[in-house]
Amino acid sequence: MASPLLAVLMTAAVIGLSSCAIKPIPLTTDEVQSRVKEDRTVLTKDQEPVSGPIDLYEAMARALKYNLDARVELMHKMLAQTQLDLSHYAMLPRLAANAGFDGRDNYTGGVSKSLITGQQILQPYTSADKNIFSADLSLSWNVLDFGMSYIRAKQASDDVLIAEEERRRVANRVMQDVRSAYWRAVSAERILPSLKMLDEWVKSALEKAQAIQDERLSSPLVPLQYRLDLLNTQRYIQQLFRELLTAKLQLAALINLPPGQEQEMMLMVPEREAETLNLPLDMTVLEDRALEARPELRQIDYRRRINARETKAAILEMLPGLNLQAGGNYSSNAFLFNQNWAAYAARASWNLLNIFRYPARAKTIEAQDKVLHTQNLALTMAIMSQVHVSVAQVAQAKKETSTAKLYHDTQSKISEQIRLSWRIGRQSEQAVLRERVNQVSAELRYDAMESELQVSWAMLLAAVGEDVLPNDLRQEQSVSDLALEIRTRWGKSKELLK
């Protein structure tokens, strides 16, 4: 009987080993195309369509709701919350249900032998059926595991708060990027028509200069120098084109608009706020506010709290564990007098090696706390420096914006005077074109400095930890409601820093 059984086992082993020889299977073209199609559909799924011109705060609201970086951090927070909910179940007792079937082709038998004479004193007998079905339902609870699970749940709750601070940090960075891209896109929308007109004007002037050179109506040097001036102007216009054409693409990417729709996106020109952004006088107040509210420092505070709870976990590991168990049992064995019975038990276990391991654990926890404390001190100094740098940047941006405004106004008046002189024949077309290009350049510089001022102000708010974002960002909240809330909170931020 052993030989056939051995043959069966050998055959099963060969089949099992051959089935484990798995070869790498590359993705098929259909699978890749299906993934691409699904991703393109999901990218903009359930987004509110753009129904009109977009202002700055709607762009910020769309970035908060639909920007993928911001959504990733929101998913991280949701994952941390889910892990916290899961850790609560670890504190519950363990309820286990078991069922099994045991069978054999003959009865289990037994005999009795005298310990004195060594003789068999009973005939072979059995006390079990050949086929037995058994089941049990037991409730067990380890007191030490409950204490450890409670500590891990408290640490998981701190992980949720760390994820929330990280979401705040990423959201503030996205808001800064949106403000910068929005002002550049507004500048592009306002200036690109003028650049296109100037480009056509330069092309026409180049054709006229070529005609003058071909007809030799003047000395060869004069039209060549004129062409060189026109080509320099054309090169500068093309440079401005290159800088401005991608502005809408960058803004559309930040607010997660589908590619190709950026040209249809209309923007509302926001009011210039250079005169309304006032700097506070007391730097100490800003420093204290930054040290209290910056998400980076709060994250370290939560990590230190997690590390402190690790000390309690190390102490619990040294204690003996007490396991309590109770349950009901059933067996189909007909030879049993009681086929149903309740069982209960209490067991204590103690890993004595944990006592010797504790000093090393304690040193590790203490070293980790020192690292976090040093990081906290380094961040404190860096954040205080950031506050001072941000204030200096805002002050400098206000000065440069004021100078850019004055330059723009003066250049506009010069361009107007040159244009009037050209109409009565006192100025050449080249002079008019040059001043018009200078006017567009001055307008672009003015917009760039206004954008820089807005970004500097946003950086100051981020440096002091002012939370101008909604506390409870809900996916079901409409873009218009979210934009209104951001506008209100952003307006209040101007008063907070006074």
Image (cartoon, helix red, strand yellow):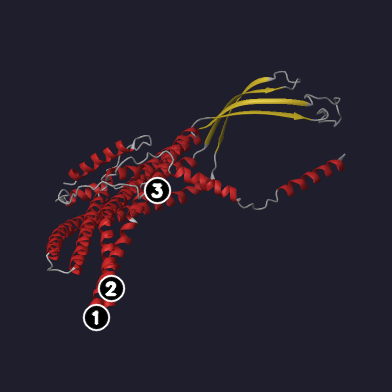
Q: CA distance from mark 3 to mark 1?
A: 58 Å
Examine the rendering and report whether any part of residue 381 can be seen.
no
Q: Position of residue 97 (x, y in %)?
A: 61, 28
Q: Position of residue 398 (x, y in %)?
A: 17, 56
Q: Quadrant of residue 121?
A: top right
Q: Position of residue 230 (x, y in %)?
A: 26, 70
Q: Going from the N terminus, do you reach mark 2 or mark 3 first?
A: 3
Q: Nearer the viewer, residue 439 or 481?
A: 439
The residue at which mark 1 appears reads as: 221
The mark found on residue 69 in the picture is 3
Tell me which residue sits at (44%, 52%) in the image: 364
Q: Helix or strand or loop: what does disc 1 sit on? A: helix
Q: Going from the N terminus, do you reach mark 3 or mark 1 first?
A: 3
Q: Quadrant of residue 435?
A: bottom left
Examine the rendering and report whether any part of residue 30 can be seen.
yes
Q: Amino acid at mark 2?
A: Ala
Q: Going from the N terminus, do you reach mark 2 or mark 1 first?
A: 2
